Amino acid sequence: MEDYAQIKGFNYFLKPDYSFSSWIDFDGDRAELELTRAKAHFPLINTIRLQLSWDVHNIDPDRYLQNFESVLCLADRLGLKVIPTLFSRCPAMGNIFTDHFMNGWNWFTVRAGGDGAAIFDTYLKTIVGTYKDDERINIWDICNEPFPYAPGSYGTDRVPEEMKHIEQGEYDWMKRMYAQCKNIDPVAPLGISVLQDFGRYGIGKVEDISDILLIHPYFVHDLDNEVEKAAFLDMLDDYTVFAREVNKPIVATETCWPSQDDTWHVDNIRFTLTELKRRHIGWIGAKLHQSPEGRDELPGEPIRADGTLRPGHEVFNEF
């Protein structure tokens, strides 16, 4: 069994909009350049997390598979395993919207006989089915940050009452996606990357449809804010206690809040990764390489567009 506590790496995006244009305008040479730079700056990393795009896949499945395969080959040459993220609900990088899983809300759910989840079956069979036994993949992330409408705070269920039916619809959709993947029977475990605002409630809500627990612990405050620091550490403790209770591994598939302030960012990285290491939680940094197209709405990549490393960001090599 893989020691998931040893995972260390980054989320990698080819374009500022995260998934759609990254795959429809795929540039293998650019991926090779940027990931080679990453391995040179951070020789200890062993994993990258990719946001896939079911909608681009549906445009040209064969081409999509070729591009995905080229990234897997590149990562393998660099000693990197891959966490493919099949779907995303994050507003900044989402490709699944409410009417995708609320049956009858859209023409395609009606056309699918009232089962909107059926439109994703071919995509899952193609991607997960093709790579079900592939050792280059160490985790399948079913969905990035579901339940994005809950303004919670470190573990409180604050889904508004009027949205409870949407929360249930979203859970039912993910349960269907999980079941479809389990029927394919991939070697790598399946998980769902939960917003930190849901805390223990969030991973508890998806634990029964997860083989591995995936979390996004972001500390977004100044380090002299002792109240918020204590709340953050309590949240991490809640995660680790829950993981032991259900006997499942746990990995932070996003962490280290992005910032353009070098001093703040470096201190935040050191604090966050120290606490994750103390709890034996593997980590995937939020950002890796700035895009030549310009900054996105939440910049903070450790590697600049020209390939140079921002001051102090070799801090990742301490972990």
Image (cartoon, rainbow, N blue to C red):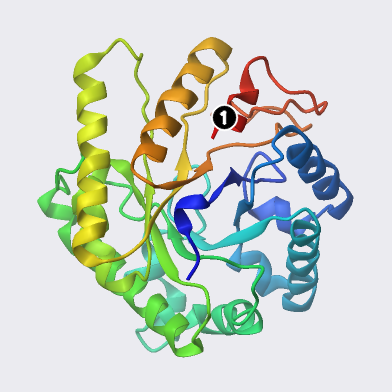
| Whether residue 193 can be seen here | yes
| Residue closer to the observer: 307 or 8 | 8
User: Given the image, on which type of amino acid does mark 1 rest?
Assistant: Glu
At 51% from the left edge and 51% from the top edge, which residue is drawn?
6
Q: Is residue 227 above or below residue 319?
A: above
Q: Position of residue 147 (x, y in %)?
A: 30, 53
Q: Residues within 10 Å of mark 1 (few under 14, many from 20)?
A: few
Q: Residue furthest right?
A: 29
Q: Position of residue 103 (x, y in %)?
A: 32, 75
Q: Position of residue 89 (x, y in %)?
A: 43, 54
| Whether residue 166 can be seen here | no
Q: Position of residue 130 (x, y in %)?
A: 66, 83
- At mark 1, the secondary structure is helix
| Residue closer to the observer: 128 or 252 | 252
Q: Is residue 232 above or below residue 248?
A: above
At 47% from the left edge and 57% from the top edge, which residue is drawn?
4
